[in-house]
Image (cartoon, rainbow, N blue to C red):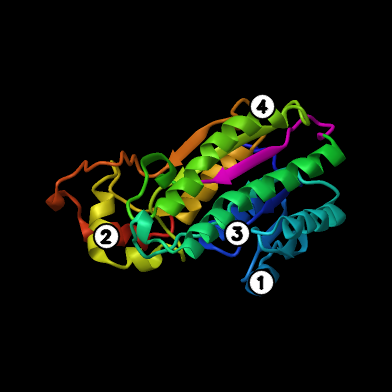
């Protein structure tokens, strides 16, 4: 199926992480032009891009998503290079690994998590919509797309990570609001949210290296397997597609193996060796 993304200009924040890189590879395979955004790992991202066969279609954009001026400057660089932005993937995020009750979380951590995960998404959306206002919609009617990366923590909550759960839960309200605003700028514009569950990424790997954690979280999933970055990337690709998701806006797509936030399997019904084996399967 032609996803209608060839030559589309796609801006991805948090592109130096596992999901971000998988998103970049997924869009690159569709022939999109890429603006890949990273903060502290921007130099590493630029070196990674240089090694890719699609490097000539990509631009590395540095900037701290916590700072609106830097996000706006990043969007300006994308416009200077490509002339417009068709798709924005607000993917940048942090997950503090230490489990703490709300009253134990240091104020600095609380503020930083919300600044990156929520305000970073807000800054990205504002810059994207401002760019769309300047350029106007595409003449071919393909429609702009804004996709946020949330988390199942925003739906189920996550004990010991109230800061993370709040920052991701707020994205649901943001999506439901912006779906009604983007169409004022582009009648075919769409806004959606992907909610990954436990996914093997650089950010989550330390927690998932613990066998007991893997057993516990997979017992809440119908599929009894951990997610991969490419699973999330493919969902984002689908939501960004003006052909596959032409009539989909304001929706939350959960990519979590059927997670329900409760135990679905007895302890002996999760085969840890099988879970680990699937992680080694490149087609997962």
Q: Earlier in the sequence, mark 1 or mark 2?
A: 1
Badge nearest the viewer, 3 or 1: 3
Label 2: which secondary element: helix
Determine the CA span between mark 3 and mark 2. 25 Å
Residue 213's disc number: 2
Residue 194 visible in rendering: yes
Residue that label 3 marks: 14
Q: Quadrant of residue 280?
A: bottom left
**Of tags 1 and 2, which is closer to the observer?**
2
In this image, 283 relative to 249: left or right?
Answer: left
**Residue beneath label 4, please?**
180
Mark found first going from the N terminus, 3 or 1: 3
Q: Main secondary structure of the magenta part?
A: loop
Q: Which residue is mark 1?
A: 51
Q: Earlier in the sequence, mark 1 or mark 4?
A: 1
Residue 79 percent location from the top left of the image: 83, 52
Residue sitting nearer the eye, 246 or 111: 111
Span highlighted in magenta in the image: 137-150
Marks 3/4 in contact by CB < 8 Å: the verdict is no
Tell me which numbered mark, 2 or 4, is placed earlier along the sequence. Answer: 4
Q: Choose between 116 and 80: the one closer to the eye.
A: 116
Q: Secondary structure at mark 3?
A: loop
- Marks 1 and 2 close (CB-CB < 8 Å): no
Q: Residues within 10 Å of mark 3 (few under 14, many from 20)?
A: many
- Asked if residue 219 lies left or right of residue 278, the reply is left
**Mark 1 residue element:** loop
Q: Residues within 10 Å of mark 2 (few under 14, many from 20)?
A: few
């Amino acid at each position: 199926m032609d996803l209608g993304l060839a030559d589309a200009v796609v801006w991805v924040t948090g592109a130096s992480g596992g999901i971000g890189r998988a998103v970049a590879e997924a869009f690159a395979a569709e022939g999109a032009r890429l603006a890949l955004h990273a903060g502290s790992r921007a130099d590493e991202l630029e070196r990674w891009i240089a090694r890719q066969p699609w490097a000539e279609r990509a631009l590395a954009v540095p900037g701290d998503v916590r700072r609106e001026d830097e996000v706006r400057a990043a969007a300006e660089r994308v416009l200077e290079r490509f002339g417009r932005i068709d798709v924005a993937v607000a993917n940048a995020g942090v997950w503090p690994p230490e489990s703490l009750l709300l009253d134990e979380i240091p104020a600095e951590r609380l503020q930083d998590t919300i600044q990156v995960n929520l305000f970073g998404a807000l800054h990205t959306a504002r810059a994207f919509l401002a760019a769309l206002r300047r350029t106007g919609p595409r003449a071919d009617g393909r429609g702009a797309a804004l996709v946020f990366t949330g988390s199942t923590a925003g739906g189920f909550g996550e004990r010991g990570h109230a800061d993370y759960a709040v920052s991701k839960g707020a994205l649901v309200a943001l999506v439901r609001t912006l779906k009604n605003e983007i169409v004022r700028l582009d009648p075919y514009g769409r806004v959606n949210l992907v909610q990954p569950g436990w996914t093997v990424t650089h950010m989550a790997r330390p927690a998932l290296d613990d066998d007991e954690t893997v057993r516990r979280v997979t017992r809440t999933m119908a599929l009894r397997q951990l997610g991969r970055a490419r699973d999330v990337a493919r969902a984002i690709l689908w939501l960004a597609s003006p052909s596959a998701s032409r009539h989909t806006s304001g929706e939350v797509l959960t990519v979590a193996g059927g997670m329900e936030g409760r135990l679905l399997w007895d302890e002996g019904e999760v085969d840890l060796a099988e879970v680990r084996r699937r992680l080694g399967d490149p087609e997962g």
